[in-house]
Image (tube, grey):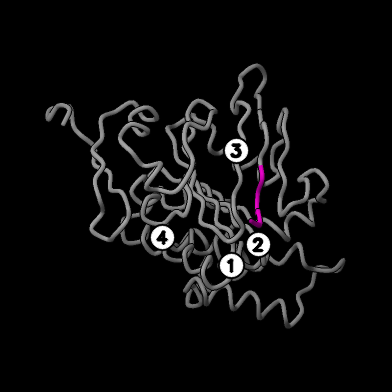
Amino acid sequence: MSLAVSIKNLSHKYEKNEILKNISFNIEKGSFFIIIGPNGSGKTTLLKNIAGMEKFSNGNISILEKNLKKYSTRELAKKIAFVPQTVSLDFPFSVFEIVRMGRSPHLGLLGSESDSDIQTIKKAMKFTDIEHLAKRKIHQLSGGECQRTSIARAICQEPQIMLLDEPTAALDIGHQTKIMDLMEKLKKEQGMTIIMISHDVNLAALYADNILVLKDGEVISQGNPKDVITYETLEIAYECVVLVDDSPFGNHPRISLVPEKYGRI
């Protein structure tokens, strides 16, 4: 089994608050791995630790079977791309300019793009269906267009691993599906490892090869959706009553919330 990420006994503290508590798990190369769990469970902290954006207190993270601490910032940027939940609108960059930023780890000292770099930028924009937005300013885009622009920038890094922090959180169901289908396409066509945080358990169940459930900084379950998405696990994680049955799309669990007025089924 070839691993994209291996985490052993990872802990992370903010001052005296222990955010991640001695967690261990592996992520297979070329898989779609989704992290779920309630607010405050440590999901974003975990993702930033994997990305090398925050220093963890104890434990070890290996990226593509090499210790994370042995990568330079530039080397790591060629292996991992991070897509935040929201895009900064502080500067009126065009879509093309933002996507072009993804080439930074690959540019020489002068920082100018070659013809090959320009082709990579155009391919990323075509892949994410934002070619027609090239000259549009970022603040003029819809939520879905902003996310596709961020993903195109990440693709431009030509990473082997893409990390996404709740990329569908502020999107309608149509745009949610487009983003998730795009991730599936990256996995299948480019062999990319997708590691994503999601608050939508049903989306996770439909798309993920593996799901990890975090609560209070601890892993309470990990495995394929059928094994992880059970009412017992979800009620422990989210402290609410849910109904889990089979999705009409095949061997996927489907989750329904049970309002208090209906009681426990």
Q: Is residue 79 left or right of residue 209?
A: right
Measuring 71% from the left and 32% from the top, which residue is drawn there?
56
Q: Could you say which quadrant of the image residue 24 lies in? A: top right
Main SS of the magenta part reads strand
Q: Is residue 195 left or right of residue 59?
A: left
Number of other residues with Cα within 10 Å of mark 3, as a class: few under 14, some 14 to 19, many 20 or more: many
Q: Amino acid at mark 1?
A: Gly
Measuring 47% from the left and 52% from the top, which residue is drawn there?
167
Distance between the alpha carbons at the discs numbered 3 and 1: 23 Å
Q: Is residue 119 left or right of residue 239?
A: right
Q: Which stretch is magenta? A: 1-6
Instruction: Identify the mark nearer the N-term, 2 or 4.
Output: 4
Label 3 with label 1: CB-CB less than 8 Å: no
Instruction: Identify the mark nearer the N-term, 2 or 3.
Output: 3
Q: Which corner quadrant holds the C terminus? A: top left
Q: Looking at the image, is 125 positioned above or below residue 47?
A: below
Residue that lies at the very extreme toward the bottom in this rendered image: 115
Residue bearing mark 3: 46
Residue bearing mark 1: 191
Residue bearing mark 2: 160
Distance between the alpha carbons at the discs numbered 1 and 2: 8 Å
Label 2 with label 3: CB-CB less than 8 Å: no
Taking depth in this image into account, of 129 and 237 the one nearest to the observer is 237
Q: Amino acid at mark 2?
A: Gln
In what element is the residue under mark 4?
A: loop
In what element is the residue under mark 3?
A: helix
Distance between the alpha carbons at the discs numbered 2 and 4: 28 Å
Which one is in front in this view, the residue at disc 4 or the one at disc 3? 3
Residue that lies at the very extreme toward the top in this rendered image: 16
